[in-house]
Image (cartoon, grey):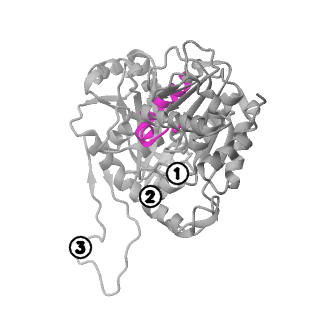
Amino acid sequence: MNKVPLDIFFAVQAKVNGWDHIPEFHIRILDFLADSDNWNNNVAVLQSFRNSSKSSIAAIYAVWLLVNDPTLLILVQSADDNTAMKMVEDCKRVINTNPLAKHLRGRDSTWTARKIVVQGSNSGRNSSIEARGIFSNVTGARADFIFMDDVEVPRNAGSEDLRERLRARIAESHHLLNPGGKKLFIGTPHAYDSVYPEIVGKGASSLVIPLLNNLKGEFPNITGDVTWHERWDHNEIINKQLACKSRAEFFSQYQLIPMAVEDSVLDPTNLQTYDGEPELITANRSSLLRIGDVRIKSVCAWWDVAVNTKKGDSSVLAIVYLSYEGQLYIHRIIELKGEIEQQCKQVRDAALEFKLPKICIETNGVGAFAPPMLLKEVRGLGIAVQGIHSTQKKSEKIIEAFEIPLSAHFLHVHQSVMSTKFMTQLRDFNPSRMDKHDDFIDAPASAIKQLPIAIGAGIQNKIDGYKSWRPHGESIEIEREMA
């Protein structure tokens, strides 16, 4: 039979389903899908707001592909098997009800909850449409099209480690494609560093359809031009916002703006950034260290040792300065590479560059062997080495180190630190779900805990009629020194 245009096939299915009207943005989606020959790098990313029928449209599209070429192989991958099988069920329904597709179901076809083999298929091993979870075993599978339908969800995108595992599985799927095969991603972002913008950034074709355009007002009373105005009125949009746990959830799921859906325990937006370097000034037989115009009171360098980095742990050296006014400056977070001897040399070089008088080493686990090895490297340089066994619960230590400095806006971070994993791990930190890989926040937290408490002079409050009764001064300075 002659090839059927996608818009005609969709219009027939819409009539079968009793849809009175096809919204304009559905036409945009159909045009985007029908143009698969022009997808950049044979990859496309379709992001449309929740409840916009994007998965239902994708099922109709999958059947349309088979109507025009029943020899095609389509693999549907979702966050889990059950979600993927829902699209297979949708495809079965389309084949059974659309008069342009009924010929696909032959008497010898094999139909299960997981797969469909249509009449005209010539593959002896693979199904015409097959459903698999993204983490399921798909060894040996082959496909001309892979539909990645909602592969990113909160449970597999809630932390850096989970997202890395998801990215790895997505990358592996490329080996399942036949020559000239294509991938279609369908979903909404569930993380600040969602996989969807990354895929688009690598050159994929993209279509993004938010619920509202030309936004007005503040959450949870945001309004604007509604994309699907036939279905969504003003009250419904407000109710959706009220049902969201946070502003971030609404913007991620309905506006397609990647944000951390869970509220951060530690708010990284309160960080202050700077790009200055420490400067040692010597005059009148005395020395002082400055970063810009800020005079530095103390510094702590903390080495969180890891040797077997293949397990995902990082060996990290954190350098944190403290000013006389009590401001904290996370100046460097250095990821150390190689065997322990090589790491010791890197720590020595950092100590010389940043004028470090002492290196603190966490001696828990493999760190117990690091202090004597580092002493060999720094002998004669005037740099002390101190091994410290940590007994405090890690989550408590991180909260104590960061919570007050962040809320008070006196935690400063060097621009170089912003390009490390520090920001991601700070944003993902959750004391009730501690991930194995948190070295880029654990090391600076340990350094901050070692620094003395400094209370600056600040702005004096003047109250009429009040005068300090204490003799010899009207200010007090408190300092806690830790060995």
Q: Which residue is mark 2?
A: 244
Is residue 320 magenta-colored? no
Taking the image as shown, residue 343 lies to the left or right of residue 276, namely left
**Amino acid at pointer 2:** Cys
Say above or below: 7 vs 352. below
Residue 62 in percent (x, y) is at: 62, 33
**Is the N terminus in the top left, top right, bottom left or bottom right quadrant?**
top right
Mark closer to the chain start, 2 or 1: 2
Q: How far apart are labels 2 and 3 at the CA level?
A: 58 Å
Neighbours of disc 3 within 10 Å: few (<14), some (14-19), many (20+): few
Dots 2 and 1: beta carbons under 8 Å?
A: yes
Say above or below: 230 vs 117. below
Q: How far apart are labels 2 and 1 at the CA level?
A: 9 Å
Q: Which residue is mark 3?
A: 471
Q: Which residue is mark 1?
A: 253
SS label for mark 1: helix
Residue 210 in percent (x, y) is at: 61, 54
Q: Residue 287, can we see it?
A: no
What number of labels is visible? Answer: 3
